[in-house]
Image: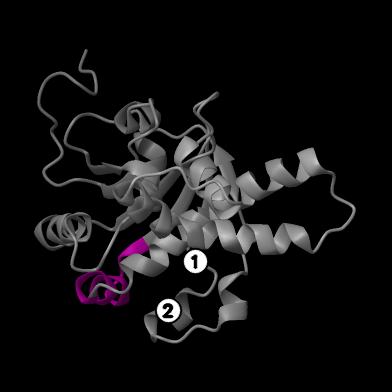
Amino acid sequence: KQTPHSGKSEIKEPLAVVLGGAESRVPIEHIFDVHSGELVVHKVMGSAVGRVDGTVMASVEYAIKKYAPKLLLVLAADQSTILADAVKSLSGSDNISPNQRMVLDRISVGAVRAMEEVARDPSCTVAGRVARVHKLATELNALYMLESMLKSSVILEAAKMGLELHAAILNESTGVVDFVGQHPMLEHLLCGSVSNGSKQQQAKDRKSTRLNSSHLCNLV
């Protein structure tokens, strides 16, 4: 029996391009129960895509141009320690190196939006506020990475031609993936115009499921 790490995939082209967190200990191919070669996986700390002219973005662009997949997925881990570091840094903890700062700056946007949103609820306890900030920041960070990737002319054009961009959250304890969906302001992003207020809106329709290759096929 073929496993995700043995043999050669019969899939001629990858089903999807996935951007995941390098800090996650769960192999992405195992999460989706696919064979090696069925996904093009990019793993970077904090699922941070980086600059438009950076290596990660260039690699994602290359994969999209080469394989023309139907799905580009940002997969964020619900227990990401990198996102926790970003929240701590915003709270005043700054004992980090310049290179760490570069990574945290990329994912701080989602953390800032989450902190602002949670701060509007005065009834939330301190412990509850920390948990809510981390949960919301995880989702907003994934959505922000979609925004960042649409700054690429290659990815933007592919999206206009039918490439689907989705965000999802991995529960590292259970292996369940919660699909956030496409960016709620995708149409505005494709047109190159989105307001600051609109950026904070979240996708309402979600689907929690233990995914396998057939579920990926349903998406693509």
> Dividing the image into 4 quarters, which one contains the N terminus?
top left
Q: Main secondary structure of the magenta part?
A: helix
Residue under circle 2?
189
Q: Which labelled disc corresponds to residue 183?
A: 1
The quarter holding residue 8 reads top left
Residue 176 position (above or below residue 47): above
Instruction: Please name the amino acid that badge 1 sits on.
Output: His
Closer-to-camera residue (92/123): 92
Circle 1 SS class: loop
Q: Could you tell me which residue is drawn at 58 percent across and 51 percent down?
A: 92
Q: Within 10 angstroms of label 1, few (less than 14), some, or many (20 or more) residues?
A: many
- Residue 18: percent from left, percent from top: 30, 47
User: Between marks 1 and 2, how big is the CA–CA gap?
Assistant: 9 Å
Q: Point out the stretch of residues depicted in magenta.
A: 153-164
Secondary structure of residue under mark 2: helix
Residue 147 figure quarter? bottom left
**Picture coordinates of residue 111, whole percent (x, y):** 56, 56
Q: Earlier in the sequence, mark 1 or mark 2?
A: 1
- Label annotation for residue 57: none
* Direction from residue 55 to residue 46 in the image, left or right: right
Q: Give the camera-side residue of 186 and 138.
A: 138
